[in-house]
Amino acid sequence: MNLAELDTESRNPRSERLDTMSTAEVLALMNDEDRLVSDAIALVLDQVAQAVELVAASLHAGGRLIYLGAGTSGRLGLLDAVECPPTFSTDPGQVVAMLAGGDMAFVRAVEGAEDDPEAAARQVDAHRIGARDTVVGIAASGRTPYVVGGLRRAHQLGASTVALACNAAALISQEADVAIEVLTGPEVLTGSTRLKAGTAQKMVCNMISTAAMVRIGKTYGNLMVDLRPTNAKLVDRARRIVAAAADVDEATAARALTTADGRAKVAIVMLLAAADAPTAARLLDNAAGVVSNAVAH
């Protein structure tokens, strides 16, 4: 399918008079169009769930979640990846992103990089991607050569593969074990896939990483018990999380966190299991890091 035939490249009849609308009318239209994104994702939740299971299996096995994309799509993958260490205490190498043009492409466009499938294959090799990893290729058009090449090479190396596109019958879908096609339709500004398509991609990436972390025990209830308290805000949040999880006051939670060297999970198990820090850590290790299992009697 030619680029001009894609839904994401089509003109949106509702915005054909965009330049003559008032500011209020432009914003109302954009807001109305954005409402369509969640509904479009709802139609592909089964595929998103399949992707989550692949990622969770990779992380359980000591593998990685690797986002792969160009332009806005690649930047959104990187944005999700860099938020995982502070939120879930993942190792920086556990959730990573590969961008067409390299890391510098996050802040400045690298012209032509997205058209080079061989560059993606070389990057996949350089990252030593293998059978324990899951690679999520992101392309609004569904046909970006860089993403096609990267997914194809990752598959050859035995990795699990997921394609995330915003058009039907996407070329990248043919290269993936799980194909997620979120049909967001024409953009308010024709072809500007940083809008609805970008919103959909961010939402799906958030779903994949968050749900996978839930599956591997990075939460207790809806609390981010594996956060890394690296600044004052996160130290305060960790204290409140421990207090809520263990149903204690914040002063008690703070003391437990100090004894646990800032590890919220250990502090919670200490309080819930009436254990010292080494015992709490051992209970967590035996429970594969799942707090609810560590404190089960």
Image (cartoon, rainbow, N blue to C red):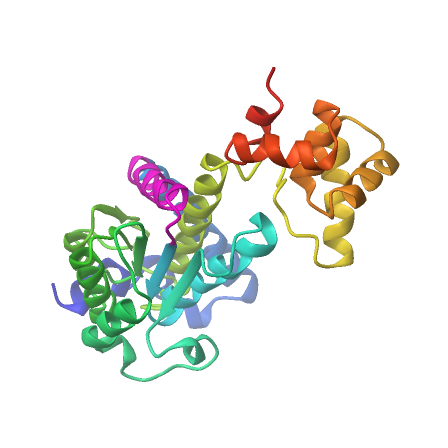
The one of 4 and 239 positioned closer to us in this rendering: 239
The x and y percentages for residue 157 are 20, 58
Q: Which residue is found at the position 35% from the left and 40% from the top?
A: 57
The one of 285 and 114 positioned closer to us in this rendering: 285
Q: Which residue is found at the position 68% from the left and 45% from the top?
A: 263
Above or below, comparing residue 266 to residue 88 in the picture:
above
Query: Residue most toward the bottom?
Result: 111
Choose top left, top right, bottom left or bottom right for residue 240. top right
Above or below, comparing residue 40 to residue 271 in the picture:
below
Question: Residue 52 in magenta?
Answer: yes
Q: Which residues are magenta?
A: 46-64
Is the stretch drawn in magenta largely helix, strand or loop? Answer: helix
The quarter of the picture where the C terminus appears is: top right
- In this orientation, does residue 225 appear? yes
Q: Which residue is found at the position 53% from the left and 66% from the top?
A: 22
Query: Residue most toward the left?
Result: 1
The quarter of the picture where the N terminus appears is: bottom left
- Report the side of 282 relative to 145 (left or right): right
The x and y percentages for residue 55 are 36, 45
The one of 271 and 190 positioned closer to us in this rendering: 271
